[in-house]
Amino acid sequence: MIIFSKVYSHESISSLPDFSPEIFYIGNAIDDRTSEIVKHAKLKSTSNVKAVKYDNLTIELIIDNIRISLRDINEYFRINNFKKIVIDSTSLDFPEILYILHGINLSLIACEIIIIYIEPCDYISRNSDIKEEEDFPLSENTQNFSALPLFSINNNVQDKSVLIATLGFESSRLGQVLGEDDGACYSELQAMLGLPAYKPGWENRSLNKHLNYFSRIETSLTPYPACNPYEMSKKLTDFYETHSKIVVTSLGTKPSVIGICLFLVNNISHNTRKKQIGAVFDFPTKSKDRTNGIGKIYTYHLENTYSLK
């Protein structure tokens, strides 16, 4: 089981401690913050920096050009036996973070995990006279929503799931998942709104862009702490206790992604025919220069505790 230990905030990348990890996982540099953290990782960890990408066509995790089947990801971590792992969630996406943590969790190796997230100074938007109606083209080339392998469940008209979705600034993605379903698999929507938001008032932008979708399906709106993955994981655990089938999709902040991933990897082994959790995703390509500047930096410290029992 992976548990939260500590959370720290930092004002600049230069103020980050020297974590001295055995391995440092990063994604692609596409804006100011990801460029700086990739540069920082390579400066601090040299050959220990590994680029990670999930290939949803071959169902493999690509780590530094080495393809690893999801069925073997736990073996990768067991053999390497890393004791300190750093993950840059800023440059990685939901599937990469999920499968890295899942592999660590299944490896039964006790280790320390540090996840870094960097807020931008601002998101790049298309101009609008009304702030709440600004459009943020954060991703492109999205695909249809599909179940994430190892986290898929049996969904059908007779036994529908509750869809839990974090709300971000791209409302079209929620519209897409609801449109693709058209009442076939989801009985209701649990919309998660991050509070306090990235900036004061930004929760109104997110909510305003999603309101028209709430009439398509029975919807409940639930706030969650936007920068606190521990609380996000706890809220999902509460839903899990009161619902027989839930499917989660991450459309919001990266800290919420971390919370979702921890909830999934710690609970997926408990799935039964009558009580199940799963996840869906649309594998978007992140837009280049989607943000500018570097804002507050968070480091989330976790521990994999299975072998400590």
Image (cartoon, rainbow, N blue to C red):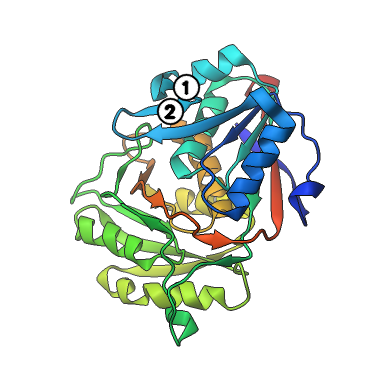
Quote the CA–CA distance across marks 1 and 2. Answer: 8 Å
Could you say which is closer to the camera, residue 195 or residue 3? 195
Q: Which residue is mark 1?
A: 73
Mark 2 belongs to which amino acid? Leu
Q: Which residue is mark 2?
A: 61
The earlier-in-sequence mark between 1 and 2 is 2
Q: Secondary structure at mark 1?
A: helix
Classify mark 2: residues with Cα within 10 Å, few (<14), some (14-19) or many (20+). many
Q: Is residue 98 left or right of residue 18?
A: left
Residue under the point 41% across and 68% down: 220
Q: Is residue 125 at all visible to an observer of this figure? A: yes
Could you say which is closer to the camera, residue 93 or residue 152? 93
Classify mark 1: residues with Cα within 10 Å, few (<14), some (14-19) or many (20+). many
Residue under the point 41% across and 34% down: 54
Mark 1 belongs to which amino acid? Ile
Q: Are marks 1 and 2 in contact (CB under 8 Å)?
A: yes
Query: Percent position (x, y) of residue 256?
Result: 54, 53
Q: Quadrant of residue 302?
A: top right
Mark 1 or 2: in front is: 2
